[in-house]
Image (cartoon, helix red, strand yellow):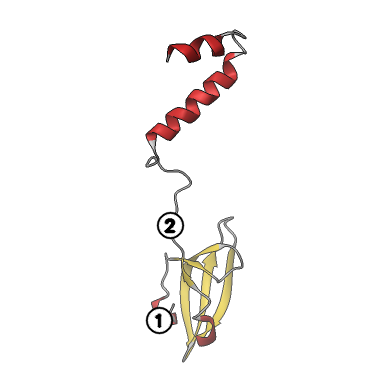
Amino acid sequence: MKLENLKPGISLVGIEATLIATVIAVVPIGDGAVQVHFKTPEGTIKDRLLGRADEMSISLATAERPWAFDGNGEDFNLAVEAKRIDLAFLFDPMMAVHETGSR
């Protein structure tokens, strides 16, 4: 990613090892160098000097959701039924066997 494209609010990979950094401010230092102030996911504010050589190691972070509702519904139903059968013995030890035959 080009140094000129760095701006506050974007999330980057490669500034901090194995973390996604959110840019707070970009201060031009000179031709081909900037000082980037960023926040880690834990909330720690840090800064780093970046030059042209660092452009190859930084990139935009892809936004990923911790969960989504776009999975296969049939697979979900199968997993829920398996868990229901697994827990049915808590109420009645023979319920899992009885209920399985009726579906």
Q: Which numbered disc, 1 or 2, marks the residue closer to the eye?
A: 2
Q: Which image quarter holds the C terminus?
A: top left
Query: Which residue does the image show at 56% across and 80% down from the upper left?
Result: 49
Indicate the secondary structure of the residue bearing disc 2. Answer: loop
Q: Is residue 97 above or below residue 1?
A: above
Q: Which residue is mark 1?
A: 4
Mark 1 to mark 2 CA distance (whole Å): 22 Å
For badge 1, the amino acid type reads Glu
For badge 2, the amino acid type reads Ala
Q: Is residue 81 above or below residue 16?
A: above
Give the residue furthest to the bottom.
31
Q: Give the image location of residue 57, x and y in percent.
A: 53, 76
* Label placed on residue 63: 2
**Mark 1 neighbour class, 10 Å CA radius: few under 14, some 14 to 19, many 20 or more:** few
Q: Give the image location of residue 13, x and y in percent.
A: 52, 67
Q: Give the image location of residue 97, x and y in percent.
A: 55, 12
Indicate the secondary structure of the residue bearing disc 1. Answer: helix
Q: Give the image location of residue 10, x and y in percent.
A: 42, 66
